[in-house]
Image (cartoon, helix red, strand yellow):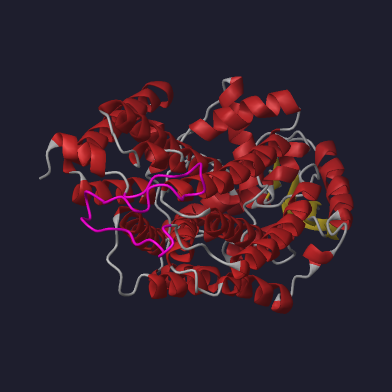
Amino acid sequence: MASRGAASRGAGIAVTGGGDGGRAGWGRRSLDAGTEVPRRRDGGRAQPGRRSRAAGIALASVALVALARVLQRLPLHISLDYNEGWHAYHSAAAVSGGVLYPPPDSWFSNNYPPLSFYLVGLAGRAAGDTIVAGRLLSVAAFLILTWLIYTIAGTLGASRAARAVAALWFAASMLLFTHYVGIDDPQLAGHAISVAAIPLVFRERRSAGTLMAAALLLSLGVFTKHNLIALPLAIVGWLAVSDRRAALVLTAAGLACAAVGLAACAAAYGLDFFRQMLDLRAYSTARAARTVWAWLAVGGVPLVLAAIAFARARLDPPALFCAVYLAVAIAVGGVLGGGADVDANIMFDASIALAFMTAIALTRRPSIPALMYVVPLAVWMLVSAERSWLSLNPDSAAAGDSAQTIALLRARPAPVWCQALALCFWAGQPPGPDTFALAQRYRRAPADEHELATRLDGRAFSAIQLNQRDAWPFSASSRASLERGYRIVRDDRAGVVRVPR
């Protein structure tokens, strides 16, 4: 193992140069890799050419158009995702002294760590609308994360043009291939917090203080969204090869942060916190495979280009870190992607890692056809059946239907059941059943669904909102109880509303 002094100086990076566009440091020797990073004959670094600039312009244009659509729908009272209303109810409970982690047999569950609820809850108080506040924080986190990718890629040695293409590819792919930018969900905020730890690790002189700060940020990321484990694992794995002392310090600090955080949660929420967090979902290996395959629709081309760029090159510390991060992120996404209702967000770490690798690949191999990064996005826009992203006001009709549904739900006495929980939240109704969690519970214990059928037969709910006429994720028996006890009074873009017969 290298001495403490050598390790702390060389762990870092074979390159420096974030602020000067990455030009400084490319001739320095990496103490970890023992290799010299090549220079051009004129003494400078090979720069991506006009094709990179053209790719950057194309990606920026696509991203701006898609971002404009996201910004347009931020204030609208339409349910963009199941998590929006679910997260809003818990955020409101967090800042009002309500029960954040109810007993596992409750009809309203919570399997997320607590930090995001307090953040969004406080922002919601200031903004006057918790869901809209959560959407604004999501956009802010997305912009910060894109900026972090650009700046950290410079720390890893990428040129300005290359890291601009990489960051814009990430932004455009997130906006077009996922719906997470601008919804009330903590995923992007957690990533922004976690990724901010990377510059603390990629330092020429690491100290125990910077490593502990990195461990704190990584831990805060996990306590914001519990699936953000790929980056901590990748950093520890990379340090275990390049600087074992730093790996031990980071691991110890991370475990200490986790212990303190879990102890605080136990004191604040009791054992129900752990029971809720450990509540298991149905799992499918086929779903896991589909999750990774779907990610390859956007990540496949950059992945192949990166593989070509590094096919016969020895990986120096920045490239090795990106490769480890990408491999771990794909593995973690593939494993966790088999959980019921797991979405594209489980592969966001893989996209972030691939963006870093793209920046390095374009810098090392300027001959890479940078416009290839635009191809998957262009193909998607051409063949997608959903063309509303081209419309000037695609959600106006849905917003009108949603407003009428919210008014109807507001007029009904509690309890009201909304599959789109955001509609009940805006209607001022207390939280009703968590449809997804109930469906998972009844798959594990079908006999428990008898209670649901009994409540439906007794007309326990003054109104039931479902996303579609046939959207009933339970058994045929309880569906029959629904049909017997409730009639449809609304059926439009905001879903179906039933009231007792």
Observer-nearest residue: 197 or 53?
Answer: 53
Number of on-image labels: 0
Q: Residue 226's image quarter?
A: top left
- Front-most of residues 181 and 404: 181
| Residue range (magenta) | 14-43
Instruction: Please give left or right for residue 469 compared with residue 475 in the image.
Output: right
Observer-nearest of 356 and 42: 42
In terms of secondary structure, what is the magenta stretch mainly? loop
Q: Quarter of the image for the N terminus: give it.
A: top left
Give the x, y percent position of residue 111. Answer: 46, 42
- Counting from the top left corner in percent of width and height, residue 128 is at 76, 27
Rendered location of residue 461, percent (x, y)? 71, 44
Asked whether, in this view, residue 103 is left or right of residue 477, the answer is left
Give the left or right position of residue 257, taking residue 457 as reference.
Answer: left
Residue 374 lies in the magenta stretch: no
Which residue sits at x=69%, y=58%? 60
Dividing the picture into quadrants, the one containing residue 327 is: bottom left
For image coordinates 73% across by 41% down, the residue present is 424
Residue 138: image quadrant is: top right
- The residue that appears at 56% across and 27% down in the rendered structure is 118
Whether residue 190 is situated above or below residue 30 in the rendered picture: above
Q: Position of residue 501 (x, y in %)?
A: 81, 53
Residue 42 drawn in magenta: yes
- Is residue 442 among the parts visible in the rendering? no
User: Is residue 38 among the parts visible in the rendering?
Assistant: yes
